[in-house]
Amino acid sequence: VIRCRAAVSWEAGKPLVMEEVEVAPPQAMEVRMKILYTSLCHTDVYFWEAKGQTPVFPRIFGHEAGGIIESVGEGVTELAPGDHVLPIFTGECKECAHCKSEESNMCDLLRINTDRGVMINDGKSRFTINGKPIYHFLGTSTFSEYTVVHVGCVAKINPLAPLDKVCVLSCGISTGFGATVNVAKPPKGSTVAVFGLGAVGLAAAEGARASGASRIIGVDVNPKRFEEAMKFGCAEFVNPMDHDKPVQEVIAEMTNGGVDRSVECTGNINAMISAFECVHDGWGVAVLVGVPHKEAEFKTHPMNFLNERTLKGTFFGNYKPRSDIPAVVEKYMNKELELEKFITHSVPFSEINKAFGYMLKGESLRCIIHMDG
Ligand code: NAD
Ligand code: ZN
């Protein structure tokens, strides 16, 4: 058992509290890792607020991080102490029909489960305070100096890759980039709309640029985002608040009938519907990435589909975490993918609550939390 610091969320929406926790050793097919850097993604914030999501408390949040393997459980052969790794919120067992399919990353055993607060091996938590369990989040719980993760939720990466940068590939940037390049697949010269210009949306814009899109239209209700978005190849903006008509109509007018592709990265149901309805009939494809309110319902007229529009959704940009992410890290190493521009803030672990404030105010893209501070 390791005793270390963790930022525990005791109650919905209340500041995290720095506690000493006990972290149990890894069981069969699990690893224990030392987290060096973690960052905050909006998904952590939704489940911490627990306004539109199931409340599970007390809990240790965090899923976007980089670290080093400390020890491995029985049966783990692919990872060893000292390996540099990214924990991933959705896993890859490499054995199920999904893992064997080239078209899916929805592993039967380890796919994202937002409401489970325990490890699948024994249905228990590896975190305790004075013997009382503290629940996991997304199988990763990276707001702790040490955490236990299933081996299938760990990507082993190049040890030369700087973990304070590539940690953002453990969720947001891979998700947005993959949503465009793996799912929306814009042909060269196409027009792409991106809804929500946070880190995930701007990574989607980066994916559009890498695919050779000729126009990238950014949509956000926060005008502060627009200046930042220019660095990501996004040169046209629409703020839905500036218009009396639905934003999909505004976009249709700007684009002679609609965009070729759209990628939604807001989590807002109305933006999801607009993102679908703004694609061109005949060939347009919309991809949903934002995590919706648990009671949200998607409403659109079926004629929008009959008119040959396609609606898709994705977790983690359809990347298989273990098989694909090492190569995405290499893209950064080869300077094909810039990560620095997504990192707008950094705080020591002791000030993790500040990272929540930056995101809630719409000031940050990614805030890196340094675990040694
Ligand atoms: P963020 O808060 O940094 O960015 C979201 C942006 O959306 C903000 O700039 C906000 O102003 C904008 N927005 C909100 N409502 C809007 C609306 N109605 N119209 C236009 N813009 C609107 O968050 P993020 O960390 O970039 O995450 C974005 C979304 O992606 C979240 O919903 C998150 O949960 C989700 N996510 C999904 C996956 C996945 O695998 N599918 C992975 C990571 C994050
Ligand atoms: Zn995330």
Image (cartoon, rainbow, N blue to C red):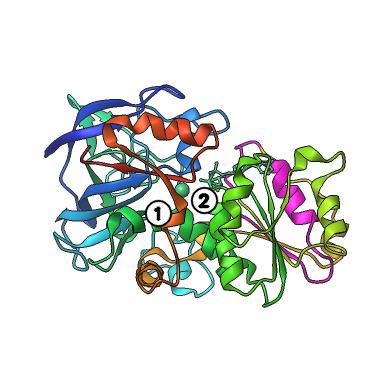
Q: Quadrant of ligand 1?
A: top right
Foreground pick, 304 / 251: 251
Mark 1 = which residue? 168
Q: Residue furthest left?
A: 1
Query: Is 25 rendered above or below residue 110?
Result: above
Picture quadrant of residue 118: top left
In the figure, residue 207 lies in which quadrant?
bottom right
Q: Is residue 21 left or right of residue 189?
A: left
Compared to 324, does 90 lie above or below? above
Q: Give 285 or 189, whichever is nearer the viewer.
A: 189
Asked if residue 261 can be seen in this view, the reply is: yes
Q: Position of residue 284 (x, y in %)?
A: 76, 67
Q: Is mark 2 within 8 Å of ligand 1?
A: yes
Q: Amino acid at mark 2?
A: Ala
In reply to whether residue 284 is colored magenta, the answer given is yes
The residue that appears at 60% across and 68% down in the rendered structure is: 209
